[in-house]
Image (cartoon, rainbow, N blue to C red):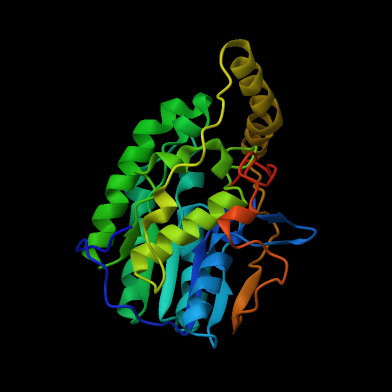
């Protein structure tokens, strides 16, 4: 939502956009593996293509990757593509693990920030919403989120990286912006993330309307809320814990969906306007508990 100096830069166009990250950047929660994933990075590419129809876009993100893996597997290929714009979002998979070290996670992010900015790319990242407000069982993770966000801001400032502050607006924890697994954004959530980064970059036509709240929605309380938590734990938390015990990841054997810079072409029937997304549900189901 802001640049390191708190002001929008002069609008510029970008010709080569490369996205690095985990499942949020890959697009889980916005489409599926059968019909194709979209996600906020695709939606941002669409916005970039409005200003420059000749935009070329690559998405190197793979679900389940921790920050160290994103750096080790995606930074080299990203630099080889010589982007003039790169986005780096990672750290949630680290945050969910028992042995979380915020300093170590951000060291990997900062190495990517440094290398990409040194290559001449404009780099953008984002802070993370409070997961405890999205999934009550995850409330103990709140101090981790706050620590990670503070370190991301500091590392970004050191390398003049643009930060979209999705941690602050209350709407970013609205359940309609999240899939049923509460870890992946819904189509509406992905659209808001794209809008937040577009706003932070100062893209033509962008603004802070992504921070606006949705129409009021009844909130389950009492027994209904408790039942919802139990169902969520059984459907998503349980399988995630089993994968952790077995040392497996949802990204095992997967590769980037768009490893090369290709001309941007949006799917003809993909919703881009918020009004075309179901505000009652967010428009998507859960797709697994690794991000």
**Which residue is at 42% across, 26% downward?**
140
Relative image position of residue 268 (x, y in whole percent)? 72, 72
**Which residue is at 50% across, 65% downward?**
20
Residue 290 appears left or right of 82: right
Question: Can residue 112 be seen?
Answer: no
Relative image position of residue 242 (x, y in whole percent)? 68, 33
Residue 108 appears left or right of 47: left
| Of 215 and 64, the residue lying toward us | 215
**Which residue is at 34% across, 69% downward?**
202
Whether 259 is drawn above or below 199: the answer is: below
Residue 64 appears left or right of 96: right
Which residue extends farthest top? 223
Question: Can residue 186 be seen?
Answer: yes
Which residue extends farthest right? 34
**Which residue is at 68% across, 46% downward?**
284
Number of marks present in the image shown = 0
- Is the N terminus in the top left, top right, bottom left or bottom right quadrant? bottom left
Relative image position of residue 6 (x, y in whole percent)? 21, 61
């Amino acid at each position: 939502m802001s640049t390191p100096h708190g002001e929008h830069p002069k609008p510029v166009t970008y010709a080569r956009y490369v996205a690095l990250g985990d499942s949020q950047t890959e697009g889980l929660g916005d489409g599926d593996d059968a019909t194709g994933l979209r996600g906020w990075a695709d939606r941002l590419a669409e916005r970039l293509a409005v200003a420059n129809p000749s935009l070329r876009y690559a998405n190197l993100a793979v679900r389940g990757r921790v920050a160290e893996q994103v750096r080790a597997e995606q930074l080299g290929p990203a630099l080889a593509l010589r982007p003039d714009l790169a986005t780096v979002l990672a750290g949630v998979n680290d945050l969910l693990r028992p042995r979380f070290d915020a300093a170590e996670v951000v060291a990997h992010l900062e190495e990517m920030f440094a290398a990409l900015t040194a290559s001449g790319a404009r780099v953008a990242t984002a802070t993370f919403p409070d997961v405890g407000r999205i999934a009550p069982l995850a409330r103990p993770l709140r101090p981790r989120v706050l620590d990670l966000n503070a370190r991301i801001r500091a590392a970004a400032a050191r390398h003049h990286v643009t930060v979209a502050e999705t941690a602050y607006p209350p709407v970013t924890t609205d359940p309609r912006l999240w899939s049923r697994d509460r870890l992946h954004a819904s189509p509406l959530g992905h659209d808001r993330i794209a809008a937040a980064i577009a706003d932070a970059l100062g893209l033509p036509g962008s603004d802070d309307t992504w921070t606006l709240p949705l129409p009021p929605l009844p909130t389950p309380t009492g027994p209904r809320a408790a039942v919802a938590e139990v169902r969520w734990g059984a459907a998503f938390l349980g399988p995630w814990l089993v994968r952790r015990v077995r040392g497996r990841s949802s990204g095992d054997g997967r590769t980037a969906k768009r490893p090369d810079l290709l001309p941007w072409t949006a799917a003809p029937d993909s919703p881009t306007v918020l009004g075309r997304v179901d505000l009652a549900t967010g428009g998507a189901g859960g797709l697994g508990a690794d991000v």
